[in-house]
Image (cartoon, helix red, strand yellow):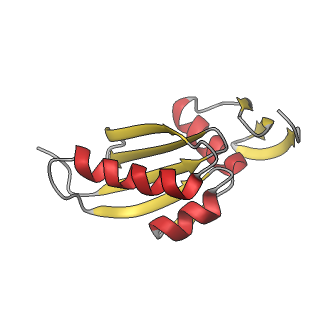
Amino acid sequence: MMADTYYLGIDVGSVSTNLVIIDEKDKIIEKLYLKTSGQPIKVLCEGLALLGEHLDKKLNIYGVGATGSGRQLAGVIAGADIVKNEITTHAVASQRIVHDVKTIMEIGGQDSKIIMLKNGIVCDFAMNTVC
């Protein structure tokens, strides 16, 4: 039996655009990885259409979240309920996997980040400006 409540996550970056639908128990229902190819609007719209095609029924999407360098754009296009920067999203997601995580490193297409946490709170971070 499938859950009744689903959430859509969108991460629009300089290299890839990623979409995921999860249920209320955090089970991945569908996911897509698409190359942004310098066309974030086009690729995001294509990704949303593909998600609709891949699903065999209409889902009750209870919330939409957006992140990545194109998060503001994605938020407007998808009608996101929440738009958060990558520092915040990495910190929250990492703690769901490793509860006492202290350090997070991310190598992206546009920049690299190191994030330090203390007692579950981001206490410091650094980013380079060129990858």
Residue situated in front as seen by the camera: 89 or 97: 89
Residue 37 x/y as whole percent: 60, 42
Q: Residue at x 54, y 58 (%)?
A: 41
Q: How many marks?
A: 0
The image quarter containing residue 102 is: top right
Q: Is residue 118 visible?
A: yes
Side (left or right) of 67 relative to 2: right
Residue 6 x/y as whole percent: 31, 55
Q: Residue at x 55, y 61 (%)?
A: 74
**Image quadrant in which the C terminus is located:** top right
Relative vertical location of residue 128 with respect to residue 89 in this rendering, above or below: above
The image quarter containing residue 93 is: top right
**Image quadrant in which the N terminus is located:** top left
Q: Residue at x 38, y 39 (%)?
A: 31
Q: Is residue 80 visible?
A: no
Residue 59 x/y as whole percent: 22, 58
The image quarter containing residue 54 is: top left
- Residue that sits furthest to the left in the current view: 1
Side (left or right) of 57 relative to 16: left
Residue 56 x/y as whole percent: 15, 47
Q: Residue at x 79, y 36 (%)?
A: 113
Relative vertical location of residue 28 with respect to residue 80 in this rendering, above or below: above
